[in-house]
Image (cartoon, rainbow, N blue to C red):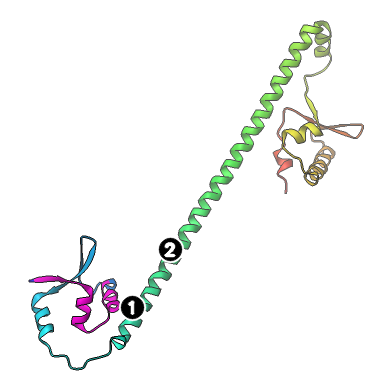
Amino acid sequence: MSKLIKPIEYASLKGISRQAVYAKIKKGTLNSKTVEGKMYIVVDEVESKEEQAKEPVEKVAPHLIDVKELLSSKDQTISVLQESISDLKHTNTEINTTLRGEIELLKQVFSEMRNLYVKQVDYMVIDKQKELEKQSAPIEAIALKESQDEECWITLDEFFERCNISKEKRKIKVVKRLRKAFMQNDERIKMQEDTIYLSCYHFYEDILNKK
């Protein structure tokens, strides 16, 4: 038969500290059971009676009881905490990596959506201009359409506004890249009297995101 006793009673029975009892439970060398939220030690009833029948050989001061067991319990607790910290660091690293990937993906999606929106707005503006031109001067509109290709060019200020570029340092860098692209015969860019114009129908992420 077996019975349940409190950890403090088991410690007194064995002549060891409560910390040593909990250390044995963590090691798995001491059988324990939780009842209604409280922990108990499972001991054999015969063993319990034999322990109680033994005469104490020597009375030891409470603060000197089983110092080795106490130190062993401390070392094991530190080891468990170190393992827990290592696991938490690994988990946090994985979470941060996942979050960075999600953020980069959202940036790409936002950039693509912004470009599509800008292009759609440009088309709407062009269609509106065509409609107004047809209503006010249909003959001139037809002559203009026949004499030149349909193009849409915007100024640097309009380009910076659409791309949400407001800092002067950023603008200077972008202007240098645009001039370099123009010198390399980039069809998206044209210059008239040292003024840069950009086509409405193209993307410029390669220039804006260039490092």
Q: Is residue 46 above or below residue 202?
A: below
Residue appearing at x 72%, y 46% in the figure: 210
Q: CA distance from mark 2 to mark 1?
A: 21 Å
Mark 1 is surrounded, within 10 Å at the Cα level, by few (under 14), some (14 to 19) or many (20 or more) other residues, namely many
Name the kind of residue labelled 1 in the image: Ser
Q: Magenta span: helix, strand or loop, mainly? A: helix
In the picture, the disc for residue 73 is: 1
Q: Residue 185 placed where, x, y %?
A: 82, 36
Residue extent of the magenta highlight: 2-25
Q: Residue 94 placed where, x, y %?
A: 48, 55
The answer to if 75 sits in the magenta stretch is no
Residue appearing at x 33%, y 81% in the figure: 70
**In terms of image quadrants, where is residue 159?**
top right
Residue appearing at x 21%, y 60% in the figure: 36
The answer to if 6 sits in the magenta stretch is yes
Name the kind of residue labelled 2 in the image: Asp
Image-based side of 101 in relation to 142, left or right: left
Q: Residue 93 placed where, x, y %?
A: 50, 58
Image-based side of 2 in relation to 196, left or right: left
Residue to which mark 2 is pinned = 87
Q: Nearer the viewer, mark 2 or mark 1?
A: 1
Q: Is residue 195 above or below residue 33?
A: above
Image-based side of 87 in relation to 22, left or right: right
